[in-house]
Image: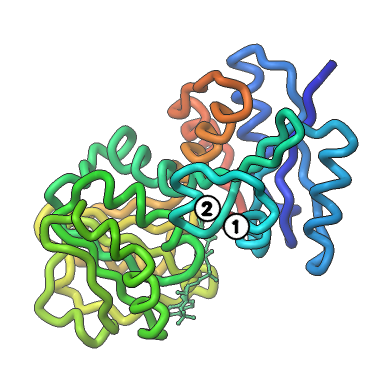
Amino acid sequence: MTDQYAVIGNPVEHSLSPAIHAEFARVTGQDIAYVRMLAPLDGFRESVLRFRDGGGKGLNITLPFKQEAWQLAEIHSGSAREAGAVNTLKFENGTIAGHNTDGIGLTRDLKDNLDCPVRDRRVLVMGAGGASYGVMEPLLRELPQQVVVANRTLDKAVALVAHFEALQKFASQGISARPYSGLAGARFDIVVNATSAGLADVMPPLPREIFAPGSLAYEMVYGRRTLFMEFAAGCGAKAADGLGMLVEQAAESFFIWRGVRPATKPVIDLLRREGGGRRAEG
Ligand code: NAP
């Protein structure tokens, strides 16, 4: 019998996940069906349990339900535990297991697709929302020199840094929070835009000198060239969007569910040829 999976969110109609997982299933010969599931904003839990009780094997979780998914999960993998958010649920042996594959998606895209190792590099993460929480632990495990978190609302960046304090040791110069106005004079090798500003065609106020020579500007939004990407390219940095992260996090979810690791590069190339999606999810 075909195993059932879905991505659940609100909104969810533009999600690329069904296309990605259909391609993974085709090339690995796995017999799965994967659909979009719109949950009412006040009906996440009921929607998940109905899907599971109907025989569903697993779900991807997108905005705005990743924290609710964390609460619903009965056991948490390391990354999900650290992030306080879940983007992958697996239903097995009567339990609901929660995972977070967003951070692995980012670090794999950086290292494997963009030839941009994190080790000993200076990393700036812009934004202190769910996406930033999701990527901090995997980023720190890559042993960067430092991670600075900048956010429009400074208190949230301070809270994020406090949340990950126990993992400070993985960055030789530690982790810290700053307002954008406190970035003058600083240089970074990797600048990650984990804000949703790109969706509204705005960008956080960055000084032009923020990009060290040879640096990478990573935009989590995909399917469009954002102001941040334009700005970074104009400052001499290499700019990448978040499509690779999306495919890599999906591959990790697929592995968690099926025990098979699909090749990602052909799927990234396929989606780019098809236009790279219309809007961001994550
Ligand atoms: P979120 O929890 O809503 O957080 C949004 C963050 O953006 C907050 O830190 C917010 O700052 C900041 N922000 C919003 N507008 C801003 C502006 N005009 N100027 C400066 N900062 C601004 O969202 P999220 O879940 O973290 O997601 C962030 C982005 O990552 C979304 O676009 C999402 O689609 C994308 N994402 C992509 C992937 C992928 O696989 N490619 C995966 C996950 C997420 P304040 O705290 O000051 O409000």
Please indicate whether residue 108 sits to the left or right of residue 63 in the image: left
Q: Nearer the viewer, residue 177 or 262?
A: 177
SS under mark 1: loop
Please indicate whether residue 218 sits to the left or right of residue 188 in the image: right
Q: Nearer the viewer, residue 198 or 39?
A: 39
Mark 1 or mark 2, which is nearer the start of the sequence?
Answer: 2
Q: Check the image and report above or below for 169 versus 250.
A: below
Image coords of residue 40 (percent x, y): 83, 63
SS under mark 2: loop
Please indicate whether residue 21 sits to the left or right of residue 3 in the image: left
Q: Quadrant of the C terminus?
A: bottom right
Image coords of residue 221 (percent x, y): 48, 58
The residue positioned 27% from the left and 46% from the top of the image is: 141
The quadrant in which residue 147 appears is bottom left
The residue positioned 17% from the left and 60% from the top of the image is: 146
Label 2 sits on residue: 223
For label 1, being within 8 Å of ligand 1 is answered no
Say whether residue 138 is visible. yes
Please tell me the numbered disc located at residue 12.
none
The residue positioned 78% from the left and 24% from the top of the image is: 3
Q: Amino acid at mark 2?
A: Gly
Say whether residue 229 is visible. no
Image coords of residue 212 (percent x, y): 11, 61
Mark 2 vs mark 1, CA separation in Å: 6 Å
Image coords of residue 15 (percent x, y): 67, 49
Q: Nearer the viewer, residue 186 or 98?
A: 98
Label 1 sits on residue: 279
Q: How is the image coloured?
A: rainbow
Q: Residues within 10 Å of mark 2 (few under 14, many from 20)?
A: some
Q: Amino acid at mark 1?
A: Arg
Are the residues flagged by discs 2 and 1 in contact, CB closer than 8 Å? yes
